[in-house]
């Protein structure tokens, strides 16, 4: 109510993603690996993920991330 900045779902996700990830995601799962595979296999860049506000979460694979990004374009 007294915030000077606009509150968005993106800012909420950014604030809590790391906490949730540490609590429920296996230690051997790496978001960066999924992003790298998405780039290598489908040519989806990190800027495309940001442009489409596509979040990469536990359980995602390169194909599912690419499909979500391309649907938004």
Image: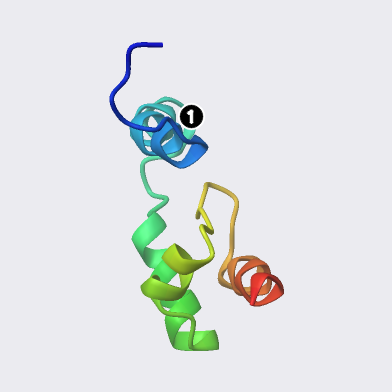
In the rendered structure, the answer to whether residue 59 lies left or right of residue 48 reads right
Q: Position of residue 67 (x, y in %)?
A: 68, 73
Q: How many marks can you see?
A: 1
User: Residue at the location (66% across, 70% down)?
Assistant: 72
Q: Is residue 38 above or below residue 49?
A: below
Lateral position of residue 16 relative to residue 62, left or right: left
Q: Residue at x 49, y 76 (%)?
A: 38
Q: Position of residue 29 (x, y in %)?
A: 42, 50
Residue 26 is situated, as x and y percent measured from the top left of the image, at 44, 39
Q: Specify the color scheme.
A: rainbow
18 vs 69, nearest the viewer: 69
Residue at 54 percent of width and 59 percent of height: 54
Tell me the residue at 28%/25% (across/down): 4
Q: Quadrant of residue 11?
A: top left
Q: Would you place residue 60 above or below residue 24 in this image?
A: below
Query: In the picture, which quadrant includes the C terminus?
Result: bottom right
Q: Is residue 70 left or right of residue 25?
A: right
Near mark 1 (Cα within 10 A), the count class, few <14, some 14-19 or many ≥20, is: few
Q: Quarter holding the N terminus?
A: top left
Is 19 in front, or is 49?
49
- Residue located beneath label 1 in the image: 24
Quadrant of the rendered structure where residue 60 is?
bottom right
Residue 39: percent from left, percent from top: 44, 81
Question: Tag 1, which secondary structure?
Answer: helix
Q: Residue furthest left?
A: 4
């Amino acid at each position: 109510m007294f915030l000077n900045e606009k509150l968005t779902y993106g800012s909420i996700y950014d604030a809590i993603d790391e906490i949730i990830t540490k609590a429920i995601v296996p230690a051997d799962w790496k978001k960066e690996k999924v992003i790298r595979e998405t780039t290598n296999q489908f040519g989806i860049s990190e800027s495309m993920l940001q442009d489409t506000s596509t979040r990469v979460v536990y359980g995602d694979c390169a194909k599912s991330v690419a499909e979500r990004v391309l649907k938004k374009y």
